[in-house]
Amino acid sequence: MAKKPKVVDALSPLDAITSAFAIVMIALMSLGVVAVVFGGSSMGIGEESVCVDANFSSGDEPTADDRALAREAFDLEKGVTVQQPDTVICQADPSLAQSTLDTLSIAPSFVVFLGFLLLTRRIIRHARRTSLFSAALAQIIERAGWLLLLGLLAAAVVEFLADGLLKASMSSMSWVNGSFSVSVAGIIGAYGIITVGRVMLHAASLQADSDATI
Amino acid sequence: MSDHRIRITLDEVLERRGMTLTELAVRIDISLVNLSILKTGKARAIRFSTLTRICEVLDCQPGDLLTYDGP
């Protein structure tokens, strides 16, 4: 009897990896919630103190005296200069608003990442269930790209504002600024995903034509 | 809704030859489902290779299988 050819499901390993990753993330989040309930902390929630990195603005570079002090403190060789090290300022007894701002300066990126991970899992499941080349799948992929692109930008803005407001609530000095950082790799990746979705949308119509050709 | 006015007259040719769709499907090595899609005019296109095999078995010309229904 002829042996049946083995059917290879190319998406099966991806499905397993994504699912495992999503389960780990959700488990960590659940552990964080449990930790907060039992007096611990997670993502800034339940922290006894709130700390932020305070960046020097360009107009407030360290003075020659500051540099000399740092040179002495670090026992630097001749010709070695000191760049301004990060300054961490902490509020030992944060208010509810400060704790909320602290969480808002960390959590949005995580939420976007988790949302994208779950959507990726949905895309893989949809592709396994239906077809690799369908208009519906192409649209979901494009939507995932937009979610990542806009989500990353929105998260960066929220984190920047929360960081700035938190610093402003802890110090009135001019050198304390919010730090805006957005993942360039993430933005490029999101743009790539949108492009793939658009290309697949055209490929899907070709596939439909091919499928309906006898 | 179909965007063309080409009608497949395979059933008429089959009737004239006294052949069933199942028999034709076996002889030209195409699934009955696909041949049924072609017969009912639901196919978007037909390969020259398929047309060749049908014409060989039914001893007909492509024009015998396709008709243009004018507006």
Image (tube, rainbow, N blue to C red):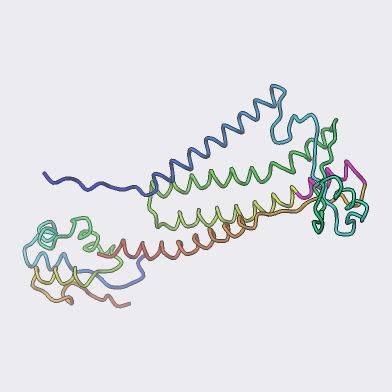
Which residue is outermost to the front? Answer: A78
Give the quadrant of the N terminus of chain A. Answer: top left
Residue drawn at 88 percent across, 41 percent down: A170
- A94 lies above or below A213: above
Residue at horizontal 21 percent and vertical 58 percent from the top: B36
Residue for point 25% across, 60% down: B37
In terms of secondary structure, what is the magenta stretch mainly?
helix
The quadrant of the rendering that contains the C terminus of chain A is bottom left
Q: Is residue A210 left or right of residue A4?
A: right
Above or below for B6 versus B28: below
The image shows residue A11 at horizontal and vertical percentages of: 40, 48
Task: Tell which residue pokes out farthest to the left in this image.
Answer: B18
Q: Indicate whether residue A167 is drawn in magenta.
A: yes
A131 lies left or right of A111: left
Percent coordinates x, y for residue B66 in the rendering: 21, 73
Q: Which residues are magenta?
A: A160-172
> Where A199 sits versus A176, above or below?
below
Q: Quadrant of residue A102?
A: top right
Left or right relative to A181: residue A93 = right
Residue A126: image location, x then y, percent: 43, 47
